[in-house]
Image: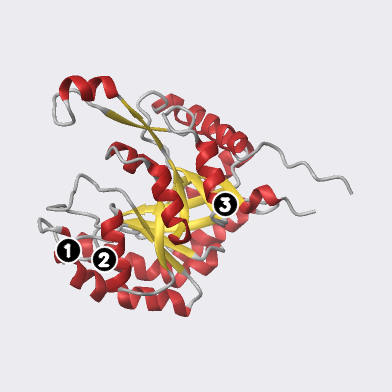
Amino acid sequence: MPNPQLDIRIGTLVNGGPNTANYIRQILPHGFESFTITFWQTLGGADLKKLAAEVREALAGSDAVISAVEIFGNPLEGEAKDIETLRGWEALIDHAHLFGTDIVAGFTGRVRGKPLPDSLPRFKEVFGPLAQRAADKGLRIAFENCPMGGNWKTGDWNIAHNPAAWELMFDAVPMDNLGLEWEPCHQMCELIDPMPQLRTWIKRMFHLHGKCATIRWDVIREYGIGGPVQFAYHRTPGFGDLDWTNVISAARLGGFKGALDIEGWHDPVYRGELEMTGQVYGLNYLKRCRGGAFVANPT
C-alpha cells in the first residue's frame, strides 16, 4: 500500500554538474528520499538533457525523486553573471519535466544597493513572463528566503526574505504558481520565531529547506547583534535550536505535500570530513520527527 509518510519526503541538496549522478548514486543508500539539484549563478555549461538522463539512471530502481531544480543568482540585474542566471531560470523551466519535478527555485534577485520596494518593477518585468512560462508547463516557482546579507534598505541578491516583501511580490505578480522555498534558519538568524510564519504562509510554501540555527542568546545579551562575537550559526537539523517535529506537524496540518531537503555545507561542526555524517544524522532525525516508520492500521 502507499506510504503516506512520503507525502513529506526527506532529502538533500546536490550540486548540479558532471558529478551529480555519481554523487546521488553514492548517497542514495543512506535513505534520502528526494534530491534538489542546485546551481550557483550559472548552469556552468551543463547539458540539461544529458544531466537529466544520468540522474534518472542513478535513481532507477529506487523510490527517490528529484524534488526541485534551482539556480541562485541575481536575474534582475544586467551584469554578465546576472544575465546567465536569467538564462538559467529559463532553461530550468524548459527542462524541469525531464527531471520529473514541477518546481524551479532560486532567489528573486534584487536591484543592487536600493531599498527593497525599488526592485518590484523589475521583479514584475522578469518574473511575470517567467511565471507564465512555468505555468504553461504546469510548473511552480519557489523563492528561497535567504537575505544574503541584505535588508529592507539595501542588498545585492534577494528580496524574498521577509513576509512584508512576500506580500509585495505576490501582489506585483499575482499568479498562483509563485511561492516560497522556505527555510526556518534564515528567520531564526533574524531573531524571528519561524513557527507563526510557517502556519501563516504554508499554502505558499512549495518546497522546504532543512536547515536549522543555533542562537547564542548569551552573546546577544552581552554584545548585541552587531558586536564582534557571532551570535547565530546555521546548523543541520538535529543540531540546532528548533524542534522539527513542530515544523513537520504544522506543515502537515497546513496541507503541505512535497519535500523537505537538507541544505548542507553550513554546519560549523559537521563539515569537511564530517559533512555526510551530519547530513545522515539530520536525515534520520527528520524521519523521526515525521513519526518514524509507517505502520499500517489494522483492518
Left or right side of 143 for 287: right
Q: Quadrant of residue 233?
A: top left
Kindly identify which residue carries mark 2.
Answer: 168
Kindly identify which residue carries mark 3.
Answer: 253
Q: Which SS class for mark 3?
A: helix
Residue drawn at x 42%, y 26% is: 270
Q: Quadrant of residue 258?
A: bottom right
Q: From mark 3 to mark 1, how far is it between C-alphas?
A: 33 Å
Residue projecting furthest to the left: 113
Q: Earlier in the sequence, mark 2 or mark 3?
A: 2
Q: Earlier in the sequence, mark 2 or mark 1?
A: 1
Amino acid type for the residue under numbered disc 2: Leu
Q: Which SS class for mark 1?
A: helix
Q: Which SS class for mark 2?
A: helix
Kindly identify which residue carries mark 1.
Answer: 117
Q: Are marks 2 and 1 in contact (CB under 8 Å)?
A: yes
